[in-house]
Every structure is written in C-alpha cells, then in structure tokens.
Image (cartoon, rainbow, N blue to C red):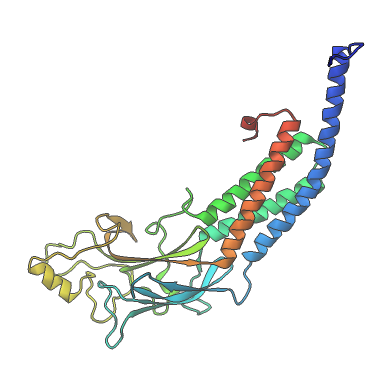
Amino acid sequence: MSTLVWPPIAIESVQREEEDSIALELEWLLTSLQETLRSLKAGLEDCAELLAPKEPGSTLVLSSLRSENLKGFITRVGTRIVKGDVQLRLPSLPPPKGAMSYKLSISTLPTAPTIALPQLTTTRTLINACLDVVDATRWTGDASNADFISGQLRLLHENIQEAKSALKGWTQDQKAWYEEPVDAKAFNPPLPSNVSFHLSVSEAAVLLNVRTLGPANAETGTNTPLSFTGGTAPPAGQSYSGFSLRERLATALGGQRQVFHDEAHEVFMYNGQEVRVRDKVRVESQDPSLMSTMAKLGALERSVALSRRALGVVMGRSDEEET
C-alpha cells in the first residue's frame, strides 16, 4: 500500500497545520498547568505546616551508639531548639563532684539567647518564596504567555531544589561549627568555654556534635597552663587547660593520650583562639516532620520538572535550554 497523499498537500499548508496544532496543544497545556499549580500550592502549604512553630514541638531522643558518651533529648519548635538536657561522659570533661556525668541544659529563661537551626530557617524562607511564585503565576501574570509560565516554573524548581538541599545538609552557605559558635548563655548554667555544642541538619535528621577543646599549643613556656578567655570558668575539678590530672600525669611519664576521631590532628580558630579537638561525639536523631517535609519536596520537585519538560517540548526547546 502507498502512504502518499493524493493530490499532494502544499508544504505551506502542512506547516500551517502543524503550527495550528502546536498552538492548540500549547493552549491546552497552559490551561492544565493551572491545575498543576493548585496542586503544587497544596503540597507547599503542607511543607510549611510541618515546619511551623507549633507547640509542643518535636522531642528528639539523643543517644550515642554503643557507648554512654552522650544521652539526652532536645525539643524543636519550628526552627528553634527550646528545651534540652544532655548528659556527657567524656575523658576530657570530668563531671562535678558526686555526679556520674556532665550535664548540659538548654536554658528556658525568656531572656536566654535562642538556639536556631539556620538550615530550617532557609528551608522555610524558600518554601514561602515558592508559595509567592505560585500565587504570582496564577493571579498576577499572563496565564496564556508560555515564556512567562516557563520562567516561573524554572524559578519554582530552583527554590524547591534549594529547600531540599538545605534539609539534606552541607550546602555552600552552611557554616562550620567553629565559624558560628552557640552562645554560652543559651545554657543554664552557661556552656563551658572549652565545650562546643553544634546542631545541624543532615538528611532530614537533627545532627548534634559535641566537642571538648584544648589549646592548639599547650606549652606556654611558664608553669601556668594556657586558658580560654572570654568564656565562663570551668567547673570545679577541671583544669583550665582542658587536661585532667590523670592525663597530665600520663603525659609527664612519657605516655600519649590516644584519640579516636577525625579532627584529632587539625587546628581550628574558635572564638578567636587556635584550638584542637580533644574529644568528639556525634549523635543523629531522626525527625519525622523533617523527613516528611523532604519527601514532599522531592515529590514537588519531580512534578515541576515534568511540567517544565512538557512545556519545553511543546515550545520546541531542548533540555539544555530548560536547565
């Protein structure tokens, strides 16, 4: 059988019919994208609700694996940590007399500084920006303008990707533990100056790193050990240098204290002083609200990506032009 059309159709007529067909398909797609935008807004509102500062918040259990180095809990309300108790058993942080462990308590006083999770603040800001983009696309722009809708979808896609990355952790804007120390007065009693308490978000879980610090150069040339300045006094029975009596005796007899963490041989600038990390304990606690938020953002990201790809095909754009 022959597939030729007789009489043959003029090339100009074929092109005109193709253009009319593409225009109709583009019109249909732009109309259907309005429903997609409504669904996206509902999903983004769910994410915003999961991160909203609602009482009583999320209480997360903290427990170090296969050791008693760290036990406790923290309570998160929105982007802030409002309550928490942590019990530490670290060689370089001897407990007060009569106690089995060293206790860190987050202050609940109204005047105490706030412990916030900047990654959650970033995520909330980006989700709110996404909601603004959706509203602007639906109500203030030209819904029949393919270039406008394409640009708005691209902006929406980028914001969702950044929000998801903030929950995954370790983005370019995230500061290291020694660059932005927590305020000592956020604890009651205040955090010792030789202890670093650092909270972050990693893979939608709250990650706590507690480090005990010592001077980078413990030899001062005098009989007085190098001490931290600008912080609170160490607890009774604890050396200003961060070394316990047992460890100083062992060092004097030629022994060397073993270290078992990845930062043992690095020097950091912390609160204006060069320090080394003596002990380090890392605890990760899964947060159901953050896990749900990241899963929803992943689904929204895929939905927007599909919409962008479909619109790009109808508009005759390549994948490179859409990225």
| Residue 142 visible in the shown view | no
Residue at the outermost bottom position: 98
Name which residue lies at 78% across and 35% down.
146
In the picture, measured across the screen, residue 237 lies left or right of residue 180, that is left
- Residue 236 lies, with reference to residue 177, above or below; the image says below
**Residue placed most toward the observer, 7 or 270:** 7
Residue at the outermost front position: 1
**Residue placed most toward the observer, 111 or 77:** 77
List x then y, in percent, for residue 142. 82, 40
**Residue placed most toward the observer, 20 or 265:** 20
List x then y, in percent, for residue 283. 41, 67
In the picture, measured across the screen, residue 94 lies left or right of residue 27, that is left
Quadrant of the frame with the N terminus: top right
List x then y, in percent, for residue 293. 61, 60
In the picture, measured across the screen, residue 181 lies left or right of residue 216, that is right
Name which residue lies at 80% across and 36% down.
145
